[in-house]
Every structure is written in structure tokens, then in C-alpha cells.
Amino acid sequence: MSSTELIGHATGSSRFVDDLDLPSGTLHGAVFVSTIPKGKIAKLDVESARAAPGVAQVFTAQDVPGQNQIGTIVLDETLFAEDEVHFVGQPIALVVAATKKEAKAASRLIEVEFEEQEPVFCPRVAARAGNTIGKTRILSIGDVESSWPKCDVIVEDRVETGSQEHVYLETQSAIAFPGEGDGVKIISSTQAPTTVQTVAARVLGVAMNAVEVDVERIGGGFGGKEDQATPYAVMAALAAYILGNTVKIVLSRADDMRITGKRHPYSIDYRLGLSRDGRLLAYEVTYYQNSGAAADLSTAVLERSLFHATGAYQIPNVRVTGYCCRTNLPPFTAFRGFGAPQAVFAIESAVHRAAAELKRPVDELQEKNLLEESFELPFGMRVGPCHGKRALQEVKALADLKQIKKEVVAFNSGERVFKKGVALTPIAFGVSFTSTFLNQASALVHVYRDGSVSVSTGAVEMGQGVLRKMRAIAALTLGVSEHRIQVESANTKRVANSSPTAASTGADLNGRALEMACETVLMRLKRFAATAYGCHERQVKIAEDEAHFGQGKRVVRFEELVDAAYLKRVSLSAGAHYATPGIFYDKDIEKGSPFAYHVFGAAVTVVKLDCLRGTYKVEDVFIVHDGGKSLDEKVDLGQIEGGLLQGIGWMTVEHLPFENGHVGAANLATYKVPDMFSIPRVTARFMDDLRNPRAVRSSKAVGEPPFLYGLGCYFALVDAIAAFRPGHRVRYEPPLTPEKVLGYLYPRSGSAT
Ligand code: MTE
Ligand code: HPA
Ligand code: MOS
């Protein structure tokens, strides 16, 4: 890993799985999948495929030496279908051949007959039939029932949020190398090396120490490789293990879009009650999460929705109910925000409806009800250090919201064809894996005799700059310059039992473990120096590659100190383990304190709508963000811009329909993602005097929260639509594509009036 890691990503020189040099004789895999959403496999004949040119082997469920089971939280997903299929795209067989082309061609020769059964695609239908995963989750605070009569205004509605394709640059990819004996080494494009290791060991029926997983970097994950990278890595491992040959699997973009999991669609019912002066008094909400055909991470995703039910607001009486509904769609999975965006969209919609009902400006309601430090959230956690109000005030000043609103009113009264809209979006995002046990990490540090340093953690680089942050932490802690630090790949042999790089905790968890390991080596060096150079341990200072031993003493270079320590047999290697302190959650009573802290911020979004075409432009987004003491401001700014744009995509153009269980937009011609022309002018500021004692070097996690800024785009568009067609009721069903906008602009006749 060179110091040019991020430049490599940006310029295309970073190598991904498909770019790696392979041993000659490497075989290639093609996955054969179900073409129906639900049914029995009446016949499966792979003989013609086996006999096809170049084919080494065809694997089905029967060829699995261990367990044919890839589930992680719930054991409900096969690697290869056995006698039933549950979704279009469910793997049935793997064809391994000399070339990718031959593997693909042979897979078409597999004969399969299904007895089709009635599929279910609607989460509410699944819930009604009792087809849910895990227990029904209900969490509450105060008393909603007795609150309704006290409310002056009550709004109720249904919200439907759509799916979203990850569109990571690198598709699901893996290479597996057979080792000696039971061993296998896997290079996988995964966010979760340990998950791949665990599941590969289970499927092969070998011990975990026989499986090595190595991840140098991945070409984007966005949650789509927390669980969904596993089956392909495990298939490659299975084939390599049985055939004794290197095997590579790289999904084509079309296959990746067709068969892998995406963001969970939610169907949501809510009821929100307020006092006449705009205080939020009671909120009742039910989430029907469309989980797809297998659990994957759905129960954890739902949990994060539950914990973000009230968004950035404080509401004293709340009841939240959540169902993971099993349907015959590909298993939905982690995607930036991990269930929070769906919940936050619902509460924001409710607040916007309520403001319209009360005929008050939305931002007044938002500001009045913003979270405060001492407030107890519905799941029992006190908010703690809270910078939401400050962010909101600062973004209003940054954008000059008063002035913008005035200008928009003036613009809209003078224009017939174009209308502008504005929205304010406060955010509060809880940081930590909601599953407490995952909040741990380990690191390993070696200082070599020449003063160069090698560091290993479980953190996976996916473009978010986590290795850049690891380098900075190691250099700052040891007091040496960054060029001395080599950040190694995430490898299960060097760092065991790592959590996925997810939940925005990559730098928090791995960074703290790394800092601790560096501190151990540093302490030993100082202790050694005190004896060797005749001073007190406390007088030893290492900074800028030099060791100082107090007034009048000589100064030595870092490498000199290290080499001297080595000759006195001082250990220059250390490992460390970090577990986030003070977090817990009890699912039986649905109370606890699951997050180390929250990330706060606020955005102002300005859009311009073309009322002839239904098209629009997000003109400006102003953001004030709480990033703690940033480990790298440029990286964090990139995360804000990237998250924002992904959120804008989900709200606007990323329409992902399913047609009888088939993904209706399986390439980038039919699935529209934001492009360079969609990028608004972004004016983002950090509240850079803030320090977060709950994370490494006073920093704050940054990966997911900015996705929520994108939500403002929907409400700004609704504001613009209202300027054209006052009083017309817009549904809260993102994405708000130009087609849908036209429908709202011209509700009946389809032409301008
Ligand atoms: N940024 C880039 N460039 N690529 C990614 O895949 N994933 C996001 C976010 N930012 C992602 C990204 C998601 S979903 C998460 S959880 C975090 O990065 C994970 O990395 P971190 O924990 O180091 O922030
Ligand atoms: N976020 C992301 N991934 C996860 C989580 C979470 O809270 N819990 C389990 N996997
Ligand atoms: Mo992120 S959705 O937690 O990988």
C-alpha cells in the first residue's frame, strides 16, 4: 500500500481483483441461477455442461463437503439451491472452466425444470401471512395512546421507499488459491474478510485456521459487500479446494445488478401528533421492511431503522414497530445508512406534512423539536454531547436561508415554467454497530530495525480513505513521518476475528486498536531510552522522526533509537485489541445505550424544477457537519460529497423496479445514477473546533451520515411542485423521478392548464 492509495483510486492505477496477475492454468467460474421467483426444482441435469469444452467441473449443492449454508445472523440461506428456489438470481450451480467464456457457455447447457409456486413480493402480504424473519420488534417511550387526545393536529400517512443498487465500481469478485492440505487462500472483494473466512470454513468443512482471506482494497462496497461478497468468495474457495487449482469468479455488471442484494425497500405507516404551537408530542410508526428471500443482514438493518425512528427530533411519546418481511426477491442487504435513511425519510415526511397542516414554515418546526443533550431516545439512550442545534443555526447562516427563501418566493412569482424549492435537513446518526459484540477491533504493529513500520488492522479500504487514516494515526502516535508507515492488507492471518468494515466505524475501531498497539511499542522504546540515554522515561519525547531525552542530552534519529533497542533485545512488535466501552443493548426490554455517540449536522438544499419537462437540477447544497477533529479533512469532505450524492440519487433518479421478481433495470442504461451533471454546488463546512472524546484522536465517524443530507432534495422538490400546483398532495414515495414529477404537476389532464 503506497501513500498514493487514494490517488490510485482516482486515477485508476489501484488494482482490484480482476486486475491481479494469475498463475497459469487458473480456472474461471460462472454462476448458474434461478430464473423464477419461487418453486421446486423438479429436475437438474448438469451432465451436458460437464461435458462441454474447457469445463473442469460443475458444482451443485451435492458437492459441498461441509454445510451448504451461508447465513450469518440467521442460518436460512444456501450456497447452492437444494430442492427449492426462492428468488430470481438464486445460485443453483457453479460451472468452472478454462476460460470465462467457456464457463458461461457451458452454464447455458444446464437443464433445469421448475414447478413454479405463487411468489410474494409485497412485504405487507408477507407480514399478514406471518412470513417474517426474527421477532417483531416494538420499542416505545412515554405513552402514545393517551397522547392522541392531547394533540391539536394529527397527520397520518403511508410512505414507500424504493430499493437502490450499490453500483460499486468493482463487481463481486474473488480468487481462491489451493494451499497444502486443507488450506485455501482467498482474495475477495469483501468488506468482511472474517465473514468470508467463517463461511468458507463452514462450507468446506475445515477449521477457520485453514482459510486465509486477504483484502488489499476493494473498488467500493457501500454495504453491498458486507454480506453479499461471501457466496462468490466461497464458491471460488470450494472449487479451488476440490480441484486443487486457482479459481477466479468475477461477476459481469449485468449479473451483479441482476442477482445481488440491494437496499431494502420499506413500506411505512405513521401517525404524528403535535400541539398547535408545533411541538411534536406523539409518533407511532410501523416499518414493513422488504427483506427479500433470506435474512442476510435484514434484522440488523431493521434495528438501525428502529433506533433512527425519530430522526433528528425529540418526541416524548413514541411507539415503533418493525417487521422483517420475507418475500421472493433477492435478499436485500446493507447499503450506506443501513436502515436509517428509510426511517429518517418517514419522520421527515411526517414533519413536512404536519407543517403544511399547521400552515407553519417547516424549518420552524424542525428547529423547535431538535434533539437536545439530556433527551432520552425511545430505546433508552440519552443523546449526550449534541451539536445539532449549532449545526442548524450555522447552516442557516452559511446559506443565508432567510434571503434564499425570499429570493425563491420572488423567483417563483416571476416565473411560469421554472419553480424553485428549498429544504432544511437536520441529521443525527448513531455510531457503533447496533450489535454490540461487533464493536471491537485488533491491530498489529511491527517496527523494523531501519525504523520503517508495518501496520495491520482489519480495516478494508473501499475508497473511504480508512488506510490513509490508519497511516496518519500510526505516524502521529509514534512521532514519525508518514512515509515510514506501510499499511498492510486486511488479512485474517495477521488480524483475527475482525468485524466488517461497516457501520462507519472503520477508523474508530481499527484506529483505536492501532493507536494502542503503537503506544505499546512507544512505551517500550521510552523505557529503553531512559536506561540507555540516562534520563527519565517522562523526559523521552519522540517527534518528527527524532528522539529527545531532555535538556542538554543528545538527539538521536528514530531509526538509531530503534536499532539500539533491538540490540538490547527490546520487542518492537505489538498487538492490541479495542472494544468500545460503555455500550449495551437489551433486546428483551428494548432498552440500552447502543451507540458510542451521534453525528450531527444540517443541510440546506435548493432545487430548480422545469415545470414543462418535469426535470430538475439540485442547484445548491449547504452543509454544516460535525466531524469532530478530522483525521483528514479532504477525505472527510469527499465522504460528505459522495454520501450526499448517493442520497440525492436514491431520492431522485435511482428507480429500481422489480417485475415478477426480476430486477427491472439491470444495466446502467436503464438504471440511472447521478452523473457529473447532477452534482450540485456543495458548500460544506465542518464545525472544526469540536472534539469527540468517544473516538480515536477526538475524531468522528463520517462514512454514512452524510447520505441523509441527500434526503433534503425530495422535500425541496415537493416545495417547488407546491409553488406550481399549490395544495396538490404529493405522495412520499421516492424516487421522485421526472416522470413522477410530471404526474404531480399535471394531475388529471396530463397537459398544462
Ligand atoms: N466511500 C467510498 N468511497 N466507498 C465506499 O464503498 N462505503 C460507505 C462509506 N463511504 C463507501 C464509502 C459505507 S456504507 C460505510 S459503512 C463506510 O464508508 C465504511 O467505511 P468506514 O467505516 O471506514 O467509514
Ligand atoms: N451497521 C452496519 N453493519 C452492521 C450493523 C450496523 O449497525 N450491525 C451489523 N452489521
Ligand atoms: Mo455500511 S452500509 O455499514 O457498509
Image (cartoon, rainbow, N blue to C red):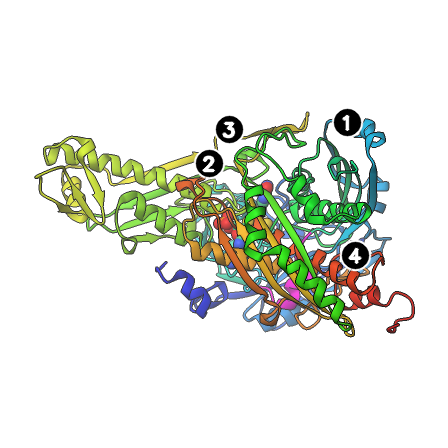
Q: CA distance from mark 4 to mark 3?
A: 44 Å
Secondary structure under tag 3 reads: loop
Magenta residues span 250-263
Which sits earlier in the primary sequence, circle 2 or circle 4?
4
What residue is pinned by disc 1? Answer: 143
Across and down, in percent, residue 322 comes to 75, 38
Q: Is mark 1 within 8 Å of ligand 2?
A: no
The answer to whether residue 586 is left or right of residue 44 is left
Secondary structure under tag 2 reads: loop
Q: Camera-side residue: 544 or 388? A: 388
The answer to whether residue 661 is left or right of residue 556 is right
- Looking at the rendered image, the disc whose residue lies closer to the viewer, 3 or 2, is 2
Which sits earlier in the primary sequence, circle 3 or circle 2?
3
- Looking at the rendered image, the disc whose residue lies closer to the viewer, 2 or 1, is 1
In the image, what residue type sits under mark 4? Pro
Q: Residue at x 82, y 30 (%)?
A: 150
Q: CA distance from mark 4 to mark 1?
A: 42 Å
What residue is pinned by disc 3? Answer: 582
Up-down relation of residue 389 to residue 60 (above or below): above
- Looking at the rendered image, the disc whose residue lies closer to the viewer, 2 or 4, is 2
Contact between marks 3 and 2 (CB within 8 A): the answer is no
What residue is pinned by disc 4? Answer: 37
In the image, what residue type sits under mark 3? Gly
Contact between marks 2 and 4 (CB within 8 A): the answer is no
What residue is pinned by disc 2? Answer: 694
In the image, what residue type sits under mark 2? Arg
Q: CA distance from mark 1 to mark 3?
A: 28 Å
In the image, what residue type sits under mark 1? Asp
Secondary structure under tag 4 reads: loop
